[in-house]
Image: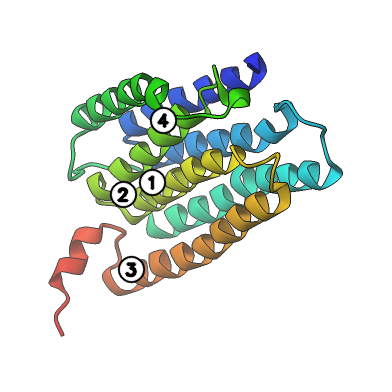
Amino acid sequence: MNHNLNLLLDVAMGLNLVSLACSRLQTLIRVMALQGVILGLMPLVMEHDLDWRVALIALATVFGKGMVIPLLLRRAMRKAHTDRELEPFIGFVPSLLLGAGGTIAALAVVNLLPLLPEHTGSVLVPAALATILTGFILLIGRAKAISQACGYLILENGIYVFGLLLLKAMPILVEAGVLLDITVSVFIISIVVDRIQTVFDSLDTRHLTTLRE
């Protein structure tokens, strides 16, 4: 059991709950960025012979999730002149309760899963499940496109954590694949956010219900 890895995973799960309680978009972006940096550092502390390619992917992940993506989201936020989620589809307290309940359930169910011996005692799987659930709650529970974009990226963080289970077997394929997926998603999110802002002069996705064929 890697105590340093578990510590990082515990912090990442704590940030999940913080993101669900955030109404300020700037804070949500910072939480998402910090979680991305923490996840990017995880390959460096896992119990395996550190390969320079893994270190390069970790560095690229920290740079992309911790700097590039937050920069794009902040730019979209400034362009839209919006800084707060005021009327979410799912309230902040219910979101927080759902996230906390999901995290507890993930920690409880991990003992029932057939994990490899090297993953025994690790919280990789519950952290991945809790992070995916958090991203899903933000996706369906927030009205602002930026909040939903952060939810999608947090969901991607959960997939990234799942990928760490295969780091020893397929380090480059797993990490590069997830990083490429995130890169493509950022371009898509940027285009969608820009179009919503241009057409509706707002990032509230409820305006999309006014569209007709």
Q: Which residue is mark 4?
A: 16
Viewer-side label of 2, 3: 2
SS category of the residue bearing label 3: helix
Mark 2: which secondary structure? helix
Left or right: 185 in relation to 68? left
- Residue drawn at 47 percent across, 40 percent down: 158
Dot 3, crowdedness within 10 Å: few (<14), some or many (≥20)?
Answer: some
Residue marked by disc 1: 151
Q: Which tag, 2 or 1, sits closer to the chain's start? A: 2
Residue 98's quadrant in the figure? top left
Q: Earlier in the sequence, mark 3 or mark 4?
A: 4
Q: Position of residue 122 (x, y in %)?
A: 55, 21
Tag 4 secondary structure: helix
Using residue 41 as the reference point, say whether residue 92 is left or right of it. Answer: left
Residue 131, position as x, y percentages in the image: 42, 36
Q: Are marks 2 and 1 in contact (CB under 8 Å)?
A: yes
Q: Quadrant of the N terminus?
A: top right
Query: How many discs mark residues in the rendered view?
Result: 4
Distance in Å between CA atoms under marks 3 and 1? 17 Å
Residue with the mark numbered 3: 196
Are the two marked residues, 4 and 2, in contact with CB atoms closer than 8 angstroms? no
Considering only vertical position in the picture, is 67 above or below 121? below
Label 2 – label 1 distance at C-alpha: 5 Å
Q: Which residue is painted at 25% across and 49% down in the image?
A: 140
- At numbered mark 1, what does the secondary structure look like: helix, strand or loop? helix
Q: Amino acid at mark 2?
A: Leu
Q: Is residue 202 above or below residue 129?
A: below
**CA–CA distance in space, label 2 to label 3:** 16 Å
Determine contact: label 3, label 1, CB under 8 Å. no
In 3D space, how far apart are the residues under numbered discs 1 and 4 (Cα atoms)? 10 Å
Mark 1 residue crowding within 10 angstroms, few (<14) / some (14–19) / many (20+) = many
